[in-house]
Image: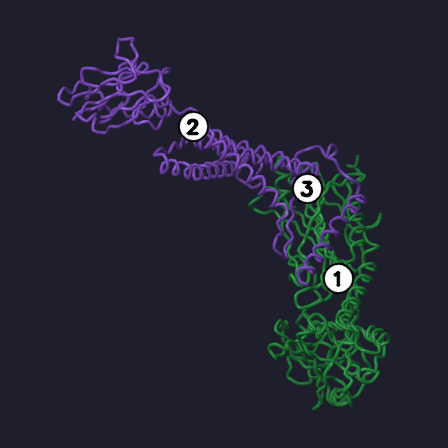
């Protein structure tokens, strides 16, 4: 059995797989078969294929910086990979190791390799882990600082875990769709995108809630906020599609624009949706930590006079029903 | 309204029907022989059994009692006994039975506020008539009540007059005696035969209520010549309720009205003798603040239908005493208390759904977040139910969430009351700016 190994600049074997496992991809993206780090390494740098005669060939993918033989500066788009002819990618070496020689097998099976790979796994995804930490931190802050119940630490933990679980479930669906459609899950990238969307979405909701607090009857935001919300969703869809498949940019833009418009009109339509009859009264207070003196307000008599509009709606509802019954 | 259950103690009505309340059965003291039996014999021809049948199912909807009153062919009963004839006249028919006679009845007039109705029974011949005489009674006087308890046949019971019920907007007499479902609308008389009132409700344990006879007299004095349509009756009921609302509410929450200090706030309490306030302080384990509750209301409700009552006014204050809470946590707790749902009576046929308006209101001492939710009572033209909920903004250690519920009122009265109620909540003088 032959093995394909990746040796880093320090001479350590950092990845390995059997030569029978081709075709396979190599690059800096975490879902490559063989992960390679380095400033000159593209996310999806090259692919290793097996020719009809059994030889292995390394071929450049897309916009990568190319391949070369170790010690030889000439770049190539495609190079054969043999036990005697390794291929250099950035600062790493791709080599084919014959099992009979067992030249590097000793080190490759050492336990340190696993630990190294785990550390590498963590170190190679700083953005993904950062996103998870940010989300957990936000959840913990919400639980700790806003919930009035006892056990603030438990509140913080509960909200942080709940947020992470919800986002993992959401992202898991994206990853599953990517896996089915394109053969690549890319959970980590989707997680970062989802975190960004969640934070932007929270920002939009916060703007709306301050609007409800300060100007509860204002209609100036009636169009603007649905538009912003729709834009956030359009960007979310766009980001999702871009992560799943980097081609078809124009098609993705059209899909995202369509979804954004649909969201916009759905929100507008929801404003006029007639809630089914209920014997319950649901209140919708939004309270914010703002100085009372700075909050726009009316005197009680003017507030009471403004209820006339409410009366108009109630009377109109009856008329609407009466005409419907006729 | 679930919240109402805490303050409304008028009791179960005595009509016998699918939803009739079961009172606690307590045996009456054995009547002294002679006068009760004689009274029964004398009054029995005047007391009738009233039934309302649903025409689709051809079965009973409700059974109650009534009595003949002058002029001839007029039967007095409770409105709640025959409410279906007013609310759903197309589906219901009413009949009165006494002795071996049975006649069809029609509703001639309704006093919905006092739960009275006068029925027209043109084919009624014979039967004695009870003429309402305003009897002068003292607490402890014996009173006899007649009716058809649980439709078991005409019965007479003996009880005690215990004066006027307190904490109500509409007068009721307190009768200590074993009234039971089916006796609604029956007469309550002195042993000499003078009408004291009309059986109307019980709370069990011999705690029962009568409509004073003076309202029977008033209603009999205003009878139309012919039975009006159900629609005209409902219009009249709406007018009565609207008038009652103005009388009950227009003098409340005015400057100088009683207030109670809750934390740093002064809020309305016992605005008139008809109101009674109850309170409690709780320290729920799951939260880190104290909850002080202060509720005020009148001990009554006005029956409109089996599913809808009106004519009630009550308000409640919840003080969240959260000295150890940060401001944001106190805000979250206030928001949760503010957004607690309320459930009302009624069906989609009787009322529109609730619609709400929100605003920030500034009085001389405070700024409030206020929300008013209202619905229109479809069957009673021009009447609405409304809830005001408000909380002062800028709270630091204490937060007050106050709720005012008004039912069966004209909208202009609701508007005036909302304005006065908000203005009546102030910061304690030492804290006011």
The mark found on residue B311 in the picture is 1
Both marks 1 and 2 on one chain: no
Looking at the rendered structure, the secondary structure element under dot 2 is helix
Residue B10 position in % (x across, y down): 71, 66
Q: Chain of mark 2?
A: A
A51 or B333, which is in the foreground?
A51
Residue bearing the label numbered 2: A128
- Mark 3 lies on a secondary structure that is strand
Callout 3: chain: B
Rendered image quadrant of residue B264:
top right
Q: Judge left or right: residue A156 versus residue B374.
A: left
Up the image or down, B102 lies above or below A203; here it is below
Image quadrant containing the N terminus of chain A? top left
Q: Colour of chain A?
A: purple
* For residue A81, side relative to residue B24 (left or right): left
Query: Residue B303 in the image: x percent, y percent?
Result: 72, 67
């Amino acid at each position: 059995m032959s093995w394909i190994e990746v040796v880093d600049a320090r001479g350590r074997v950092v990845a390995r797989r059997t030569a029978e496992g081709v075709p396979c991809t190599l690059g800096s993206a975490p879902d490559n078969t063989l992960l390679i780090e380095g400033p000159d390494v593209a996310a999806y740098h090259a692919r290793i294929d097996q020719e009809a005669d059994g030889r292995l060939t390394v071929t450049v993918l897309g916009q990568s910086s190319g391949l070369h033989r170790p010690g030889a500066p000439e770049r190539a788009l495609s190079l054969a990979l043999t036990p005697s002819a390794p291929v250099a990618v950035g600062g790493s070496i791709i080599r084919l190791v014959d099992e009979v020689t067992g030249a590097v097998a000793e080190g490759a099976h050492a336990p340190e390799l696993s630990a190294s790979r785990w550390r590498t796994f963590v170190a190679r995804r700083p953005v993904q882990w950062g996103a998870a930490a940010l989300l957990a931190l936000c959840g913990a802050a919400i639980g700790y600082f806003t919930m009035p119940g006892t056990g603030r630490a438990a509140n913080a933990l509960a909200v942080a875990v709940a947020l992470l679980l919800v986002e993992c479930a959401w992202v898991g669906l994206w990853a599953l769709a990517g896996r089915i459609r394109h053969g690549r899950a890319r959970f980590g990238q989707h997680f970062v995108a989802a975190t960004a969307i969640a934070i932007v979405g929270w920002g939009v909701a916060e703007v709306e809630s301050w609007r409800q607090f300060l100007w509860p009857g204002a209609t100036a935001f009636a169009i603007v906020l649905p538009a912003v919300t729709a834009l956030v969703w359009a960007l979310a869809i766009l980001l999702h599609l871009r992560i799943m498949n980097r081609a078809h940019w124009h098609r993705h833009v059209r899909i995202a624009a369509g979804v954004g418009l649909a969201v916009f009109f759905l929100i507008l339509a929801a404003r006029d949706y007639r809630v089914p009859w209920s014997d319950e009264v649901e209140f919708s207070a939004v309270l914010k930590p703002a100085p009372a003196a700075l909050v726009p307000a009316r005197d009680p008599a003017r507030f009471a006079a403004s209820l006339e509009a409410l009366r108009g709606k109630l009377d109109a509802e009856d008329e609407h029903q009466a005409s419907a019954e006729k | 309204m679930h919240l109402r259950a805490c303050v409304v103690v008028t009791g179960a009505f005595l009509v016998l029907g699918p939803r009739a309340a079961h009172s606690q059965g307590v045996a009456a003291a054995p009547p002294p022989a002679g006068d009760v039996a004689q009274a029964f014999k004398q009054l029995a021809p005047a007391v009738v059994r009233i039934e309302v049948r649903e025409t689709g199912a051809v079965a009973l909807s409700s059974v109650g009692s009534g009595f003949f009153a002058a002029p001839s062919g007029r039967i007095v009963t409770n409105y709640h006994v025959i409410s279906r004839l007013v609310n759903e006249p197309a589906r219901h028919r009413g009949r009165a039975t006494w002795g071996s006679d049975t006649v069809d009845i029609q509703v001639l007039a309704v006093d919905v506020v006092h739960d009275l109705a006068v029925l027209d029974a043109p084919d009624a011949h014979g039967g004695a008539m009870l003429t309402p005489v305003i009897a002068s009674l003292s607490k402890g006087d014996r009173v006899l009540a007649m009716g058809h308890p649980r439709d078991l046949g005409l019965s007479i019971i003996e009880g005690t007059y215990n004066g006027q019920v307190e904490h109500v907007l509409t007068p009721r007499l307190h009768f200590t005696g074993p009234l039971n479902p089916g006796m609604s609308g029956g007469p309550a008389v002195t042993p000499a035969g003078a009408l004291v009132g009309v059986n109307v409700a019980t709370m069990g344990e011999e705690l029962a209520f009568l409509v004073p006879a003076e309202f029977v007299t008033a209603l009999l004095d205003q009878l139309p010549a012919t039975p009006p349509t159900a629609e005209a009756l409902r219009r009249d009921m709406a007018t009565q309720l609207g008038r009652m609302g103005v009388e009950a509410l227009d003098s409340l929450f005015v400057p100088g009205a009683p207030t109670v200090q809750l934390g740093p706030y002064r809020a309305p309490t016992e605005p008139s003798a008809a109101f009674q306030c109850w309170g409690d302080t709780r320290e729920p384990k799951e939260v880190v603040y104290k909850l002080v509750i202060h509720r005020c209301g009148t001990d009554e409700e006005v029956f409109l239908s089996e599913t809808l009552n009106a004519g009630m006014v009550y308000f409640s204050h919840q003080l969240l005493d959260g000295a150890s809470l940060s401001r944001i946590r106190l805000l979250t707790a206030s928001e949760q208390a503010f957004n607690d749902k309320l459930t009302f009576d009624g069906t989609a046929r009787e009322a529109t759904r609730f619609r709400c308006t929100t605003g920030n209101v500034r009085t001389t001492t405070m700024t409030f977040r206020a929300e008013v939710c209202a619905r229109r009572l479809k069957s009673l033209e021009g009447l609405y139910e409304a809830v005001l909920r408000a909380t002062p903004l800028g709270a630091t250690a204490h937060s007050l969430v106050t709720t005012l519920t008004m039912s069966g009122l004209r909208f202009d009265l609701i508007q005036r009351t909302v304005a006065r109620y908000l203005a009546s909540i102030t910061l304690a003088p030492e804290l006011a700016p």
